Image: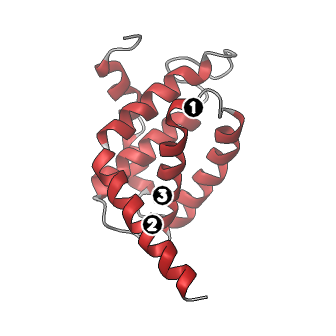
Amino acid sequence: MLFKKRTIKNGYKKHQKEAEKLVDNPKRLESLLKKIIPKTASNKKGLAEIWDDFLLLISLTKSWYKGEYRQISKKSMVMVIAGFLYFFSPIDLIPDFIFGLGILDDAIVLKFLISNLTKELEHYKQWQKIHDSASDSSL
């Protein structure tokens, strides 16, 4: 493996304290997502393997800060936010300005994050289906 598991953990753990401040701050979380979305769109190719799950993490975070979905532990949300902070940071294991490679470490950290939140993402996906169908039926 290109990066050791410990290196990956340390990559987003350095953002944990900031994530702990953001987890209960809807305005700052919303602001973070507004910054992440353009970077996400411009790196779709580099995130292809995890694209759907990454979009699900963004949706989960929106539902969290809006207070719509809270069936995930705060600890798990801190992990998600720390992963987003890592993704957004231009200086990390492989700096983003290195064309073609800068997204590689971001994708690895996000993949690691997603693999650790598989059960929570499945629960959210089920909630989302029910929530969306309830919204559609009320129209």
Mark 1 residue type? Leu
Of labels 2 and 3, earlier in sequence is 3
Position of the N terminus by quadrant: top left
Separation of residues labelled 2 and 3 (CA atoms): 12 Å
Label disc, if present, on residue 128 of the rendered structure: 2
Q: Quadrant of residue 128?
A: bottom left
Total marks in image: 3
Pick the quarter of the image with the C terminus.
bottom right
Q: What element carries label 2?
A: helix
84 shown above or below 23:
above
Q: How far apart are marks 3 and 1 (CA)?
A: 18 Å
Which residue occupies 66% across, 32% down? 43
Q: On residue 47, which mark appears?
A: 1
Please indicate whether residue 13 sits to the left or right of residue 65 in the image: left
Q: Which amino acid does label 3 sit on?
A: Thr
Residue 68 in view in this figure: no
Residue 5's spot in the image, x, y percent? 30, 20
From the viewer's side, name the closer residue of 43 and 92: 43
Q: Position of residue 123 (x, y in %)?
A: 32, 59
Query: Could you tell me which residue is drawn at 31 percent across and 51 percent down?
Result: 76
For marks 2 and 1, the one nearer the N-term is: 1
The answer to which of 77 and 92 lies nearer the viewer is: 77
Judge whether 67 appears above or below 111 on screen. below
Percent x, y of residue 38: 70, 44
Determine which of the numbered discs, if any, sits on residue 7 in the image. none
Q: How far apart are marks 2 and 1 (CA)?
A: 23 Å
Q: Residue 61 carries which label?
A: 3
